[in-house]
Image: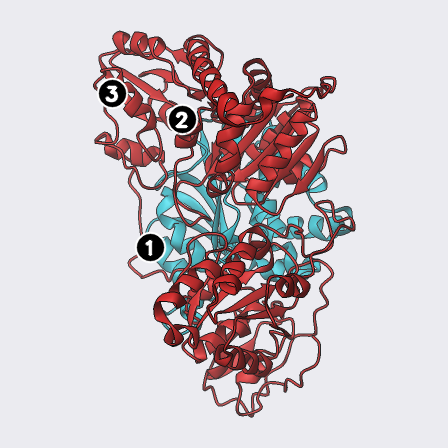
Chain colours: A red, B cyan
Amino acid sequence: MKELMLGNKAIARGLYEAGCRVISSYPGTPSTEITEEAAKYDEIYCEWAPNEKVALEAAHGATLGGVRSASAMKHVGLNVAADPLFTISYQGLNAGLVICVADDPGMHSSQNEQDSRHYAEAAKVPMLEPSDSEECILFTKKAFELSEKYNTPVLIKTCTRVAHSQSVVETGERVVPAQVPYVKDPTKVMMTANSRNAHVRVEKRTKDLIALAEDCNFNRVEMGDTSVGIITSSTSYQYAKEIFGEKASILKLGMIYPLPEKLILDFAAKVDKLIVLEELDPFIENHCRRLGLSVVGKDTFPICGEFSQNLIRSCLGMKTVPSVKLEDEIPLRPPVMCAGCPHRGVFYVLKKHNIMVYGDIGCYTLGAIAPLNSMDLNVCMGASCSGLHGFNKAMGKEGEKKSVGVIGDSTFIHSGITGITDISYNMTNSTVIILDNSITGMTGHQQNPTTGKNLRGEPAGKVDLEALCKALGYRRIRVVDPYNMAEVETALLEELEAEEPSIIISRRPCVMIKGTVHKPPIEVNKDKCVGCKACMKIGCPAISVQNGKVQIDATLCIGCKVCSQMCKFKALPQYDGEEA
Amino acid sequence: MSTKNIMIVGVGGQGTLLASKMLGYVLLNQGYDVKVSEVHGMSQRGGSVVTYVRYGEKVYSPVIDKGEADVILSFEKLEAARWLEYLKPGGKMIVNTQEMEPMPVITGAKVYPDNLVEKMQAAGADVDARDFLALANEAGSSKAVNIALMGRLSVYFPEISDEKWQEAIVANVPPRFLELNKKAFELGRNA
């Protein structure tokens, strides 16, 4: 049966049909749905690991145990998983291992725009790049065959427009290979002589894979008009077909590492002008130049951002379609923290005291946006803790008394634990606030080791944050309710003053978690409201001003009363410290 | 036939993803090749969101570019104005007249422009503006605004039978909200 399927769901379907039995991943846009969709098949064990390195090691461990396994992550997640990746490439497997990595050109939901293809080359691991959902299924299944035949992990690389686009697929049956028995093999220990031999094997493997790339189903030539030849892959292939149809010849590369040589040279010889169409870095282009070819590439198309049909047309000097625009300035609509978000009050207090905030990766990154403007920095998962430590080593007391790290529960487990260990071990009097909202929020509510539930929502082990921090050498650990801004403020000021490192756990579940109890929306006493807009300084989307008086959007308000604590005129119902 | 382009735009959380899923379902069922492209993640938190739906004999690019949309279905007025550039000259703009203030307007840094429907008409768009939120409320829930808008969109597909739209509603909304959504669809279609 034909059906419309999201690219990520199609990868999950490919994993299912290939008989994959274990998947260990960490959520990250635009890769998250791969694991969520795979988890809907009872036949596949799926888990959220604490981070991508752990996930890849767990998936690799499962292949050593003899079953086909996979791990999925976003592009920056592969940085975290790079350490095992490079050595798994040497050590090999006992059953197929597929690693799905999703890039985010245009940075719809990412902090950088790195090009994951470089990892394939650097780790000497083959990489397949599907261009639609149908290829997502097909390539994922083929990846397991390649993985087992060549004894290598295989990367499946997508981008946002493949991962989050639905296109038509036909599904097949699941075929499960028999579990391969584990046999002790002394050459699997990656040290000295074994590693040297493994490296030789890897170099030979790459040569074999290049031979495969010359003649395989992943790479195909579509001859049309020969005045222009386009070498392309992924979503860029779709744009090329959209623009040129039969008016150009196309070499579509589905295997992006290693790249073929003879196939490219033969194609180049058949066309008058050669264009390499690829998003982000000149990866295919550099390969072509190494082969001595002259190509139109990043001299014409941008390295930054996503492509589209019009962008490519205008880069090539082709006609684009006209469009109209209003003269009015259309105000931007940036994403905002939800009404009732437990992070809001914390950021307001930090802003009020002009604290340097080293933030982290998650919904709370929105604390950087107006009107809170309360985040100075962020880099990558966990940097709020380690980066703050370094900052305070440089700044001394001046830094320690006026700075905090802010990190969410899932991010803390991912990469914050080692950072706060640096603080306690190497001794800065740093203060870290863990925003514990009992969920991984930004990626769409995934469970994590602090929630007490597993990926499927079943009871699971639970990390005790207070006990963990204590074990890591902290004596000053306090838990606050972020709806109580006075409590947050007192804790913050006392911990900044303290002559030892501190952890403040701001604990309240995300309001968007199913089952979180909401209070009724609050009502404004219009007689008392003077329209001073003090309550609007917290940036709640439920609050606006109409005719000089504040009004509350009852469809959004969940009665948290953080705004009430801003009102000096008692126009909003008083907050009396109760549980919302 | 050449590829047709429909954009569904709105504010994160308004149910645009369900609408695009339902539209994709109908078009596939009608025998077209279809691509639907959406963005998840950060923008879902109350930001401006857009979904591209393309259909025809064979669809390649998953995205719609400026000046290419045959129809834009906008869940909110300011969002209609924001994405107007993507409409083909003379293309159809279906607008829910609901106003949702973005944060820069709430904080007073920017103003919500007035008379947007008239201005879009003056710019040459074929605007079909109605209060779909009121229709959704009439059907029983403000959350059904997406299905009320789909009802209006269905008017512009004479080739697709009412039966197929009904089938798509059944396939895409939870059974306990089925009657409510069917009513919202009907109200939108006959608006």
Residue B139 image-quadrant placement: bottom right
Give the quarter of the figure containing the C terminus of chain A. Answer: bottom right
Residue A153 can be seen, yes or no: no
- Marks 1 & 2 on one chain: no
Whether pointer 3 and pointer 2 mark residues with C-beta atoms closer than 8 Å, the reply is no
Give the quarter of the figure containing the N terminus of chain A. Answer: top right
**Gap in Å between the C-alphas at discs 1 and 3?**
51 Å
In this figure, which residue is indicated by the disc labeled 1?
B122
**Camera-nearest residue between A26 and A276:** A26
In this figure, which residue is indicated by the disc labeled 2?
A121
In this figure, which residue is indicated by the disc labeled 3?
A289
Left-right relation of A429 to A438: left
Left-right relation of B177 to A332: right
Above or below, A64 against A58 in this view is above
Mark 3 — on which chain does it sit?
A
Residue type, label 2? Glu
**Are there few (<14), some (14-19), or many (20+) residues within 10 Å of tag 1?**
few
Secondary structure under the numbered disc 2 in the rendered image? helix
